[in-house]
Structures are given as C-alpha cells and as structure tokens.
Amino acid sequence: MSITKLICLGWDKIRDYVENQDVPFVQYLITFLAVVTLRNFLDIFADTAVVSFSLLSFNNVLHLSASAGIFISMAHLYLFWIALMLTLGMVYSWVTKEKPANTLRTIFSFSWIILLTPIIDLIISSGKGIEQQYVIPQHLLELFPLPAILDPGEKTTITVSLVFTFLYCAAKTQKLLFGFWGVILAYFCNLLSLIPTYLIVVASRFANAPGLKTAPVIVVIRVLAIYIFCLLLAAMRMQSKERFRMIVKETGLLNILHFVLLFGFGVFIAARNAEIVILANLGSFLLTIISLTLGWISLVMLKKSEKTVAFYALATCLLFSLAVNAATLFLIIAGLSLGYIYNFLPIKLKRVAFFSKAALAGMLLLVFMLGWLFTGRGILHFPPILMLYFLVFYSASLNVLDLEDSSPVMAAEKGKGIADIYGEKKARILAGLFIFASYLACPLLFLEKRLIIPCALIGLLQFSLINLKRKNKLIFLVYLLTLIGLIIWRRIF
C-alpha cells in the first residue's frame, strides 16, 4: 500500500468526527474558544515573561485598575489565535479546494495541539515556566528552519502542526506534492506573530530608535482585528460567491460610503488637522469603519431573515468596536438600538409617518458623533446646534425614503408613509421642500456665507430630482457628493 493511500485511509477513519455536517459550526467554534481559554490559563504558569498575564484578587481596590490590563492582554491572545486559525483555514481551503467551513471544522477539532506548548514548557522547566515572546527578525535567514528564540514547547507545537498540515493536505488531494505545498504555506502563516513586531523594527529604523523592542498591546489588537476582518471577507467569498454577492448587494456600497463620509465629516468638523489625527490613529479609524459596516450588515441581514449572518456580523461588530474603545462600543450599540426600534416589532417605528424618521436621524447623528469623539473631543462639548440639525432637518428629509415604498407594502406593515397620507404628487413636493430647507440651513449651521449659493443650487437640484420622479439612488448620490464637498470645504477653509 502506498503512503498516499495509507494517509487517505487514516483520514477516512476520523473524517466523520472532525467534519461532521450534522454538528452546528458554532459548536466547533465554542470548542476552539474553550481550548484557547485553557491555553491562556496554562500560560499563566508556563510563561515567565516580565509582562505576563496574571490573575489578581478582587478584594483589593488597588487591583481594579489592573483589571483593564488583564482584559486587554486576554483580548490580544484570543484575537491572535483566531487570526492564526483563520489563516490556516484559508491556506487549507486554497490547497485542497475545500470550503472554508469544512477546513475550519477540522482545524478547530485539532486546536488542542496548541496546548502542547505550555504543557511541554512546564514539564521541561519542572513547573517553573519558560519565557515566551514574539519573534523579532533582523534578517530573513533567522526564520529558518525555526527561529532560535522559540522555546521547546513552541518548536514542538509548530512541528506537530506542520506534520498535521502535510497529512491533511495530502489526504484531501490524494497527492503528496500538495501535502508539502500546504506545509510551506502553513509555515509562513505560522509567522503571523511576526507581523506586529516586525513592523516595530521597521518603524524604529525610521524613527532612529533601534532599541525599540515592544509594541503597545492595544495596537497589536487593532492590527489583528483588521486582519481578521479581511480573512472573514475572503472566507465568505470562498465559501459561497453567490451568498457573498447577496450580502454585498443588500448591504449597499453607497450605504457604507455614507457612514464613512459622516464619520469622516465629524472628524473634520472637530479638528482642523483632521488628516493628521486620522493618520496618527489609522488603526482605530479603519476599525471604527469596519465596526459600522458590520453593524449595518447585521441590521440588513436580520431584515432579510438571514439570522445566522446577522448574529455573526453583530458579534464581530461589538468585538471590533470594543477593540477601539468603550465609547465607540456604546455609541454603536446605541445606533443599532435605534435601527432595531425603527425596523422591527414590537415597536417598529417605520409604520409611523414623519416622526419615525427621527430614529434614523438619531442613528446618523451617532455616526457623526463618533467622528467628533475620535479627535479626543468630549461628547458634552458637542455643539447642540448640530444635534438639532440632525433631529429636525435630517428627520424631515428622510421622509423621501417613503416615496419608493408602494402603498401595498406600507399597508402590509400596517403603517402609512407621506405618499399614503397626501398622495404621491403632494408628498413629492413636501419631501422636496424638506430637503431644500435642509440645504438652505447648512450655511446658517456653519456660519459660512460662501455656502449659500452652492447649497441653494444643490437644494433646487434635489427638489427637481424628487419631483421628476427620479430614483432615490440618484438623490442619495447627490447627497453623498454634497458631503464630500463639505469635507473638502472644511479642509480648505
């Protein structure tokens, strides 16, 4: 019997356990998180690093401040392992042409391999532990065959994982060559831990600080979160292109652009040197946009009864927004709450004409406030006039959304739009006047005379588009271009 057939025979015996389609995917995920939790607990004793994770008693007031550091340390470790497993899952899928859901089931089933590191280190050190640290390569050759700085447990874990990778890829493809190809790719993916630390080395050279050896953990968390988001997008597309296209279509790229522009406009309103603030906190900026996107996806997918997608999008949104800071998490939850109250029973404000749009306006106001807070400004210093503008003018203007909702649709939802109350012709005139008034209020809002003529012209254009029965998408596009123009104006003047 050839080696390939022997490997395939062994894989067939365990296939039903590690790729059981009858077991919900979430159970494999929980198993993986349980293993990571156990690994983190064992590392308390196995890792003697100077800044290691440790548990503190809860009856000492002085330890309360340290709890935040413990939480940050734990978050970093969980995100690291999630990023690594997702990367390996993508490698396995690419080599074997299997769906990511199947490869991740297998990886999560064998995630216990990561427990070898603390167990071996504790055995070798007689319970004293061995320091674990990120590898900081100065030269590429330091990475082969394995970085010397790795402790015995880490070397063993990597070796075992590479052997498993070879067996899995060879069994799935029934070709030894693909097994070796999987090992090569998986090895480089195991060097994921070098990403943040290698960037430190590069940054220190530019900053003339060659002695820099550590990275702020919160920065590592944000880098890993952004990386995980990219992996999730790739995994979703590889799992089902049709489903991925459906999510993108229903989410709407223009809607995402809207959130980005509102968030960015808030930044530019709060700070004159907004671009410097954004570049200095680029990780937080990108992660906030990602969190807003995921939150919107969760609402849209819930409306489409795609509850599984909605759940995972919401969970990821909350985790990523927390990686930015607690204020971002709170405002995003507040915005999602307004979106839920507007769209879903038992309240479902969408059924009420006029005043229901205050919920949507409030959601957009919170996105704008996020930009304000991003610059370091306090929420109590947020201009009340801006809040009033959103709640009055935005609420009135958003009634244009009801114009493309047919009466049968509104009737099915047991509600009425302005077209049902006043008739389509009068409703279009009313909606156009609302938007025109909103544009005229902009120069007064910013106390800028130079905006009067441009805003009046754009307001008239919007009024015309509405009454010429143009699609809301065109009206929305003109509005987005207006936001871009206001950001440019703010930057120049």
Image (cartoon, rainbow, N blue to C red):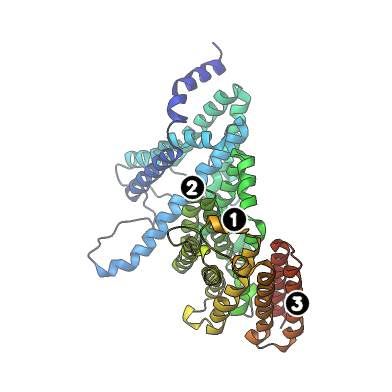
Q: Earlier in the sequence, mark 2 or mark 1?
A: 2
What is the spatial separation of the Cα atoms under label 3 and label 1, in whole angstroms? Answer: 31 Å
Image quadrant assignment for residue 88: top right
Q: Nearer the viewer, mark 3 or mark 1?
A: 1
Q: Are marks 3 and 1 in contact (CB under 8 Å)?
A: no
Q: Which mark is residue 460?
A: 3
Q: Residues within 10 Å of mark 2 (few under 14, many from 20)?
A: some
Q: Nearer the viewer, mark 2 or mark 1?
A: 1
Which residue is label 1 attached to? Answer: 408
Is 218 situated left or right of 226 in this image? Answer: left
The front one of 312 and 74 is: 312
Q: Secondary structure at mark 1?
A: helix
Question: What amino acid is at disc 3?
Answer: Leu
Q: Nearer the viewer, mark 3 or mark 2?
A: 3
Task: Give how far across and how far down residue 219 sits, in percent.
Answer: 51, 61
- Residue 439 in view of the camera: yes
Q: Is residue 209 above or below residue 239?
A: below
Q: Secondary structure at mark 2?
A: helix
